[in-house]
Amino acid sequence: MTTTTATTDRSAETPGAERTVFLLAHTGRPAAIRSAELVVQGLLRSGIGVRVLAAEAADLPLPPSVETVAEASPAVLVGCELLIVLGGDGTLLRGAEFARASGVPMLGVNLGRVGFLAEAERDDLDKVVDRVVTRAYEVEERMTLDVLVHNNGDIVHEDWALNEAAVQKVSPERMLEVVLEIDGRPVTGFGCDGIVCATPTGSTAYAFSAGGPVVWPEVEALLMVPISAHALFAKPLVTSPNSVLAVEVQPHTPHGVLWCDGRRTVELPSGARVVVRRGAVPVRLARLHHASFTDRLVAKFALPVSGWRGAPH
């Protein structure tokens, strides 16, 4: 399952063992600073250690008992049972980089606008702390993408994504000419602004803005969504999770650029080939609620549902 809802009950962990939580926050926002202070105070009162990056600690009003680490690498999460991330979508995706590389579950608190990756909102901070203290949360795995860039037959770049890998044009005055391939066979070619290859988790992000379908997280699939394609057949495609997607940048077109989760980028020369497949390493998310994805979708997008009466009994 794309989010292999392989849920794990954290209440089974050994009681009495020393516990540490890593906190990652967008310290450029006053709301994040205040939220971080409240979370830290609540965890420390309950005897749970807190670890933060030294670069962020300088902006946070933290007591001396909070552990600080200088290196911003996944190794700093060693010994932590949870990664709590406070911020918007960009901060949550930054946290996903730590979560994937370390295997530590990420619990997101949304301080931005939509925050589909977040499990809680700013008003839920007391509940978040209580659930962490009592281990009343579950863990599910979300599918990722492994991304390879080939040029002249050589692999020139390797990357990954939780939401999407997007091949985009660079020159605003010219389209990017591409050919799409699925499982080793060509599908179609056209000029466009780009192509988004996404996971179901990313179906509500860039792929959604490009006109792609919303895919429920428990569905295992890969998406390929054209951006402003100049073609008769340029519909979003949904494939098997085991399919291998490829986007070839035609030799006669201007160079493009690859963005992974809008955070990591590399230039694509003319003739480059981007290959996307299911990632070998998932991202683990901590979940506090059992609400359906339908309810989450309605709440996050403020969808109009007034007048609904439900199915007859």
Image (cartoon, rainbow, N blue to C red):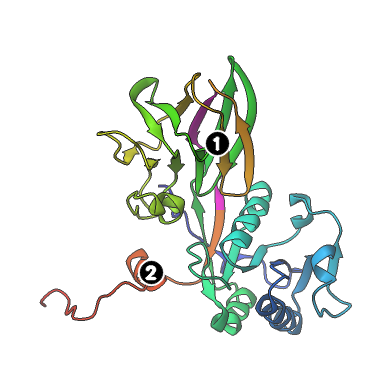
Name the image quarter holding residue 133: bottom right
Residue 126 in sight from this viewpoint: yes
Mark number displayed over residue 11 = none
| Residue found at x 46% / y 51% | 206
Tell me the crowding category of disc 2: few under 14, some 14 to 19, or many 20 or more residues within 10 angstroms, Cα based: few
The earlier-in-sequence mark between 1 and 2 is 1
Residue 277 drawn in magenta:
yes
- Which residue is the site of mark 1? 146
Secondary structure found at label 1:
strand
Residue farthest to the front, as pictured: 173
Give the vertical position of 268 relative to 16 (above or below): above
- Image check: 75 left or right of 25? right
Q: Position of residue 33 (x, y in %)?
A: 72, 77
Q: Nearer the viewer, residue 93 or 210?
A: 210
| Residue found at x 83% / y 73% | 66
Residue 4 in sight from this viewpoint: no
Q: Nearer the viewer, residue 9 or 223?
A: 223
Mark number displayed over residue 301 = 2
3D distance between C-alphas at marks 1 and 2: 29 Å
Residue farthest to the top, as pictured: 153
Give the vertical position of 126 relative to 86 (above or below): below
Kind of residue indicated by mark 1:
Asp
Kind of residue indicated by mark 2:
Phe
| Residue found at x 47% / y 54% | 6
- Image check: 104 left or right of 212? right
- Image check: 283 left or right of 213? right
Q: Nearer the viewer, residue 120 or 50?
A: 120
Secondary structure found at label 2:
helix
- Image check: 110 left or right of 73? left
Magenta stretch, residue numbers: 272-283
